[in-house]
Amino acid sequence: MNKIYPFSASKTDCHGGGKVRKIPNVCLPSETLKLVPIEGKAGTFLRTFSSMEIFEIFTKFSSLSLQCKLPLQISQKKLLADYYNVIKEFGGEQHSRHDHHDGGWKAIGLITSGGEVYTDKFIHHKPFLETPAMQMCPYIKEILSIIPGSKRRVRLMFLEPGSIIKWHIDRTDTIDGAISSRFHIPIITSSKIEFSICHNRCHWTPGHIYYGDFSFPHQVRNNWDQRRVHLVIDMVPNDDLRLLLPEAFRHERGKREFLRMICRNSYLLQYQIPQKLKKVLELLHLH
């Protein structure tokens, strides 16, 4: 097990030409350091949090749940049949937010803004319509009919082997709001895939529908040698839909609303602002 070591210095001043000073806990050359392992609960604490993002620490400390399973069963066999029907005709298009992935995140639209298979953005003047790919998916139509409320985008989404969906936030995708809420049905997946919404590790398996609050920072890493496939359903939030979520999850709405802005601001400071500054500096360098 890796041990965590605090700095514990001798009395030799590293900038004073070898003179002795009685100044403890200063930065010294390696030969003057005395490293003391931290064991027990303190060591476990440091090992746990040293590898986490700041927003993950906030949600872990508060024990905030950002995912849950709906009480609806899915036929994996029928869902796979729909998927194989679709990929015979459509190959999948890279997600339009290229800054959120490394090229291996793709989708086939079943319901999109305007009804085009490869449109993955919301277009204000175009309603959500079924695409030609949906006509190959009779079982997915059946699934959508049992989920209460209006459907927005519905997509088959792929993450290729070795690919990454980077930390990002989808601001309006929360059941606590009024615009959109996102549900996943895993079709092809593996325990080797790392899927996180803040500190929540999402071990989602085929045969179930899951809700995740994607207004919080989230990421996916496909460490598997196969393509990961999910059916992703965006719904307009409504009370009937909320009643499908566990009661304990619904009661944490106030906690989520409090931490959402904290986690978003942490994400902005840690990721978005540095990325924007880098782009500005690159433009200035070009000119």
Image: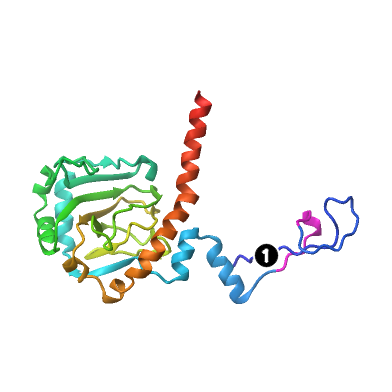
Is 30 part of what is drawn in magenta? yes
Whole-percent x, y for residue 139 in the image? 11, 57
Depth check: give the residue in front, 169 or 31: 169
Position of 139 compared to 182: left or right? Answer: left
The image quadrant that residue 189 belongs to is: bottom left
Q: Which residues are magenta?
A: 27-36
Front residue of 208/23: it is 23
Q: Magenta stretch containing residue 223, yes or no?
A: no
Q: Position of residue 101 (x, y in %)?
A: 38, 44
Residue 37's place in the image compared with 18, above or below, is below
Q: Secondary structure at mark 1?
A: loop
Examine the residues drawn in magenta and state their main secondary structure.
loop
The reply, left or right, for residue 204 in relation to residue 287 is: left
Q: Residue at x 47, y 45 (%)?
A: 273
Q: Classify mark 1: residues with Cα within 10 Å, few (<14), some (14-19) or many (20+).
A: some
Which quadrant of the figure contains the N terminus? bottom right
Q: Is residue 209 visible?
A: yes
| Residue 101 in view, yes or no | no
> Residue at the spot x=26%, y=49% of the render?
157
Residue 236 sits in quarter: bottom left
**Colouring convention used in this rendered image of the protein:** rainbow
Report x, y in % for residue 93.
26, 40
Q: Position of residue 110 (x, y in %)?
A: 16, 48
Seen at 73% across and 64% down, the residue is 35
Quadrant of the image occupied by residue 133: top left
Which residue is labeled 1 in the image?
A: 5
Three-letter amino acid code at disc 1? Tyr
Q: Is residue 95 left or right of residue 139?
A: right
